[in-house]
Image: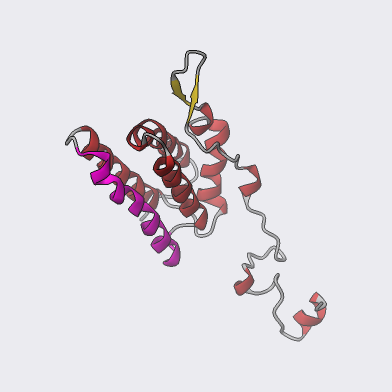
Amino acid sequence: MVDRRDAMNKGGRTPGNDKKFGNRGNGGRNNSARGHVQKLPDSYFENDEQGRKYLHPVFVSKKTIDPLARLLGQDARPNLTTGQMRRFFNECREIERLVEVDGESWERVSARFEGLCYHAQNAVWKHKIPREFQEFIDDNVRRVVIAAEPRETFLYGFLPHFEALVGFGAAYMRRDS
């Protein structure tokens, strides 16, 4: 093992002094708020005593979403801006309009919805959004796609969850100039 002081004195790379290893001036430690972000259930919904579905409160609660918003807006690199988040959210609103107003079937819009994943991946490659936001998109697209009723899951699970992130994120995310 390389002694960190020897490597530093000789101009060598160590996990704490090189961009390649994700240095953020913290000696190679990851101080992100990720540890404070709650892992969410696989399904947006729970059933009550009569078997009726309802949105699980963790998907919209301040206790759950606020730490995620803080992570994306302040602790992740690059920070997520309101403009980048709105770009993805507006695409979801457009899909909602196609389904609800125009009467499109979910089958006709599902590819567009799943396309959020590759748009997020592209934005990460271009250093426009943090990888944590891509993970948010990927995890939630997966929740919708694997659901027995993806249309309803999108409309009544994913959209309220994303709306909560937009709302709580306003306090932490900078506006695009």
Q: Is residue 12 above or below residue 161?
A: below
Residue 176's x, y, as percent?
A: 37, 54
Write down the region rendered in magenta. Answer: 104-128
The residue at 40%/54% (across/down) is: 117
Residue 107's x, y, as percent?
A: 26, 43
Residue 24's x, y, as percent?
A: 63, 64
Q: Quadrant of the N terminus?
A: bottom right
Instruction: Please tell me how many numbered marks the rendered image carries.
Output: 0
Left of 84 or right of it: where is 15? right
Q: Is residue 76 above or below residue 105?
A: below
The residue closer to the viewer here, 141 or 8, is 141
Residue 76's x, y, as percent?
A: 55, 55
Most extreme residue toward the top is: 50
Left of 27 or right of it: where is 144? left
Task: Tell me the chief SS of the magenta region.
Answer: helix
The residue at 55%/36% (across/down) is: 41
Q: Colour mode?
A: secondary structure
Q: Quadrant of the C terminus?
A: bottom left
The residue closer to the viewer here, 117 or 5, is 117
What is the quadrant of residue 123 in the picture? bottom left
The residue at 40%/57% (across/down) is: 120
The residue at 25%/43% (across/down) is: 94
Q: Is residue 114 magenta?
A: yes
Left of 105 or right of it: where is 44? right
What is the quadrant of residue 15 in the picture? bottom right
Most extreme residue toward the front is: 148
Most extreme residue toward the bottom is: 10
